[in-house]
Image (cartoon, grey):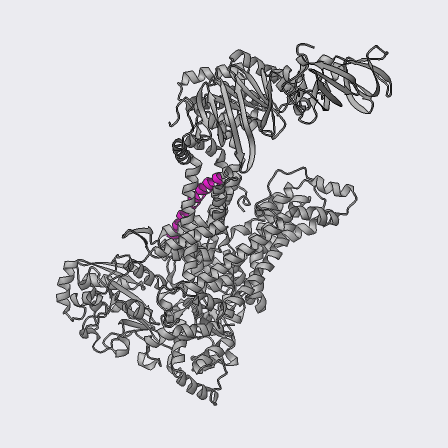
Amino acid sequence: MKKLLAILMVLMLVLSACSLAFAGEKEDKWAEDNGLNLDEPMDELYEKAKAEGKLVIYTISSRTQKVANAFNEAYPGIEVEVHDISSGTLKDQFVTEYNGGRHNADIIHSKEQVGEYTFEIFGKGMLHNYEPASIFGNVPESYLTLTPLMLELNLWFYNTEVYDACPITSWWDLTKEEWRGKVVYQDAAKNDAYCAPLTAMVQHADEMAADYERVFGEPIKLAADEPNAGYAFIKRFLANNPIMASGSDEVIELVGAKGQEKPPVGYSSSVKLRKAADGYAINYGPEKMSVSNGIPALNFVGIANECEHPNAAKLFIKFWLGGEDGKGAGYAPLVSLGSWSVRPENPNAEGNLDLNDIPLWEIDFDYIYNNIEDVRDYWIAHRN
Amino acid sequence: MSRIELKNINKYYGSNRVLKDVNLTIEDGEFMTLLGPSGCGKTTTLRVIAGLEKPQSGIITMDGRVIVNGEELFFESPAKRGLNLVFQSYALWPHMTVFDNVAFGLKVAKKSKQEINTLVHSALERMQIDKYAERYPSELSGGQQQRVAIARAIAGSPNLLLLDEPLSNLDAKLRIDMRSELKRLHQEMGTTVIYVTHDQVEALTMSTRIAIFFEGAIEQVAPPMELYQNPASLRVAEFIGNPRINLIDGDAKVENGCMTVTSALGTMVFDKEQFTDATPASSAFSCRVGFRPEQIHISRTEKPGAIKARVYSGMPAGSETLIQLVIGGHNFLGKQVGIRHYRADEEVWLTLDQRLVNVFDSGSGALIKLADTGEF
Amino acid sequence: MTQTALEQPFSRKRRFKNRLRNTFTNPYNIITLIALILLVYLIVVPLGEMIKTTLTLAASDLRRVKGGTEGEFTLYYWTRLLFSDVSRNLFWIPLKNSLIIALTTSMVSITIGALVAWLMVRTDLPGKNFFSLAIIIPYMLPSWCKSMAWLTVFRNETIGGAAGFLSYLGIQSPDWLAYGPVAIIIVLSIHYYAYAYLLVSAALRSVNSELEEMGEIIGAGKTLILRRITFPLVLPAILSSFILTFSKSMGTFGVPSFLGLKVNYYTISTSLYSTIQRQKGTGFAISLVLILLASINIFINQKLIGSRKSYATIGGKGGRSTLLPLGKWKWPIVALLILFLLVAVVLPLVILLYQTFMLRAGDYGLSNFTLHYWIGDADPNIADGLPGVFKYDQFWMYVKNTLMLVGFTSIIATVCGQMLGYINSRGRQLRSGKLVEQLVFIPYLIPSIAFGSMYLAMFMNTRYLNIFGLSIPVVPSLYGTFTILVLVSIVKHLPFASRAGTSNMLQISTELEEAGQLAGANFVTRFARIVFPLAKNGFMSGLMLILISIMKELDLIVILMSPSQATLPYMAYTYSNSGFQQPASAVSIVMFVMVFFFYWIANKFFHADIAGGM
């Protein structure tokens, strides 16, 4: 055993001698040299892109292939490779390749909710924004920290067999006795999409406190281990025995399965509304929710630093967002129930709520990134 | 056709020294038996010669060629030593037929098919098992497997044949058959044989010489009958012979080239010619008188010079009768050919030829008086 | 040749030359050296890397440790795990839960297993042939499949969703039975009793019944004999099964994740899983605690049994055995056994199978019958447009992945296992042999889920070794590749493979090899012509058993999986998590059929003994 230990020590020494190669600091210059700050017309970009001949996209959505197909029709001569990768893996894969000096991907498409891409990837210059005014001129400033593609939300779903409208209109409802053990959530310790809204709640604790008074008719009394109304919600919510689902689909299943007498309500991704066609009795009603439904998850795109096909990437991004008028074929595959464009010019899916009618908190990646881990720990500490 | 010389062989397993300065020369054509109780190092010696064990020190030469030099960590590979070994367990390869078992070494040596055929069949015929060539070892009896193992070992005509307790797994009758078989084989082939056993009868009946091992060291090397008649030490004396040698305590006194031994058997005087190198020049010390049961002549009537003894019990066994005798509190065994009936406590008279008696120094255990050798 | 025929005075130079030559021409040394290098690279280095990760500050945690710099030494992760506000829920409570589950599961499953073993070996129980097969079937269905079946039966309205079977019949099962520790213990027990059964029955067979008869002669009663003679004799086997069951239930992830997470019931392995994806440092610290617990467990057991080989099967040939007549108890016991098998074997399978024929989950009526989940075409209104498994290209891809994974892994692992077995059996007394044996044993101590995460950390990025200014890649980036799945499965199964290899090689007497050596055969010839032909059966049976084990593996690879490499267990697990119960059950059934098929082959053609490598 002593021998084993000795070997271990030696190996650890060897390992600590190993070092990872990090890139230098020429990223800004590269972006400038490749015109990522310019707003070239699409025809001009097409000519340059044809010279590059190829484009590689890492995406988290299967719909991106449809965009690529439309792109091929509109701009023949550029071979587009789409890699559909799960959101948990994509970041690791890109970073791994990047650090290994392999610049495979030109465009990265993923989801940002907690600022990890903003601070750990964009902040280090591994990805660049591309926000030409001809496309993003009318997009609200708060969505422009990363090049935005569209928004998804997590919303409260209810069972339409039992309820005519969403039975909850405030987060505080979830702490009431009548919803004890009847709320489906996911483990915020594991899932950022469920931790981020709680973090926003802590940030906007004043609004939460005011809403408490509105719901219960008296000001909130904070216990010693409840620093503010946001934290107080987390603690009291957990004390009310929520059910922890292991994925968005499971939330829908638990909420929407038909034939239930006392179905729970559940927080799940807005795009899952399509499962109503799948035999689930589900709907959401976020308009009546007081204060906020949470914070949006931003689908963003970025151009990889030192990628091989920057012009094709720029062209593709412009095309993806529907071209200069926003009505182009590139955005069409993205039009669906439960997702919203950040561009006013883009079409909205039929029957989709107006984004402005859904109360939301503004994205503040800086706050969330720096506080989410504290909220997570608070969540874990009060989990059972 | 091989002369083997072992010089100062030492072998350790960890800190356990299993061979202690083993020196042994095996002459060409000899049938040398390594004999000793279990765990004495005899099998290790055999495996060192075969090349399956590596001694830490010592040199082994084969016809003058060094095959082992422990200090220099030189070990000739077993295959190049021109020897073969019959394992105690036979170690027949169960997935090969008898023929393939015997042919394997020849195939590895890349002999021609025809030559292999000839050699294998000649080996099998010699061992009288040619008819089993196509069988698998599991389809053979223990004795037949033994023959296959020997056939495999001799097929390549080794210069040196090593046998590791080859008969220990056979029943009593087969063992006697195989003994004579092996002795014939040795005489016919003229190969040098080294044979390991713990069975002294095997050793005494088959060998040209015997090396007797105790605790990792060789105690005596001698032809079988010399070992029987003049064991170099008390340990050897007690190990060799069945029934065991009788030992009776006595007092010895050496002076003027004469040794006087006084014991329950009376007083015996031996002269210088019968001394060994271990006999002290002059002193008085305690000793043990050794004599074999068959050397005692028992008479039911009183005889001049005979010693009176009492029968403790008589044990007739057909071809011989063993008699437990008592003289002055000392117990010992006598043996007579044929059937004799003795009563308990019967009085008898014994005579013993002094020339045939051994005397050992009680302190060192060494032989200090030689017995006459020859046919007795 | 450095030695001439004549004797020469001692030469230090020749000694040195000969030493080099002896060392490097000895095949045992070469194999051992290669094995040692590989084992260090694949076991010790990842373990060291894991330890290092728990003590090194990661970039994403700079926001937690104010003023820290990336890569500096830190005790933050250990402090957070053991002495912070979250410790209680992150570590201590899950630890307590795990210990309770592991202890109870061990006791229950060993009681059942040992009792059944005793009935099978020592009594005149009728229908033994049937029972001997039926009893190990539960082992072939992964434990998490059983928890899926469990949920199907007991799911009540507490968590919402489709009704369970009992619920459908109007019976509301209580929460404590449907979810949480009781459910987990029951499901694990009807899985792990197989270990105790296999080990104890082997031990019972090796105990000569004359020992018991001796007790009868001196007038001891039956219970006294059982208690004072039989029990002590099989005690080592019972303790071995305890180690196995205990460490397996400590490390198991699937079952507590299905039955515990929804009601906030965490075990150390589910806590590990949820932590490790967020924060490697803390997650690895949990892994290390698990490894430590496993080591302590084995250490205590070794002290109890007083033998280093305590975890090994008690083998040996059976003595003469007299069967105890059960008398009037015969048929009640048979009925009880059949009832048990119904619950443990038939019911889960039937439920899973039945579920695949239900169009909508929760409706158990005949009107709901469908073959859609087997052979249906894609329909956007059923299960997100998922076609029936046999019509689904991805399913066939997963079948192919699974077969590739088990094929590669089991062959390589078995070959390595035989080689290691060769080293172990031939080098028992040597230090190198012992070192190899100890190294190989390490993966056994590491829970699957922690082992997977260890490899994730090790092979995430390409690593370079800087020597004299040269960057040499020493660790390739294997994340998301098929290779890493194969690699992790091989190494994790090495203890099993090498144990099987050792017992296989021990059967081949060294004298058989020495006889070949004397005949002039070199190492390769000896291995090819003597050792391998004799080891063939053991080789094939070891291979099949590893194949079965990997076929149903989930815990080990769940962390490393990427969609294009997914295997059947992973597919079933993901479906189940996405609420597609029927496809999940269909995939599980297919998997079970495949496992059963391979077991049948192993048993029929190679006389494989499933207890062989335990």
Q: Nearer the viewer, residue B123 or A124?
A: A124
Residue C429 drawn at (x, y percent): 52, 39
In the image, residue C354 sits, relative to residue A356, either above or below, namely above
Q: Nearer the viewer, residue A8 or C426?
A: A8
* On-image quarter of the N terminus of chain C: top left
Residue A5 drawn at (x, y percent): 47, 52
In the image, residue B221 sits, relative to residue C184, either above or below, namely above
SS majority, magenta: helix
Q: Magenta segment, which residues?
A: C396-423
Residue B350 drawn at (x, y percent): 81, 14
Residue A1 drawn at (x, y percent): 50, 50
Q: On the picture, is C273 further left or further right than A114?
A: right
Q: On the picture, is C13 further left or further right than B336?
A: left
Q: Nearer the viewer, residue B141 or C403?
A: B141
Residue positioned most to the bottom: A218
Magenta stretch containing residue C403, yes or no? yes
Q: Residue B308: which quarter of the image?
A: top right
Q: Residue C33: which quarter of the image?
A: top left
In the image, residue C378 sits, relative to residue A231, either above or below, namely above
Q: On the picture, is A64 further left or further right than A191?
A: left
Q: Residue C300: which quarter of the image?
A: bottom right
Magenta stretch containing residue B56, yes or no? no
Q: Residue at x 49, y 56 (%)?
A: C447
Residue C382 appears in the rendering: no
Residue A370 appears in the rendering: yes
Count of numbered badges drawn on the protein: 0
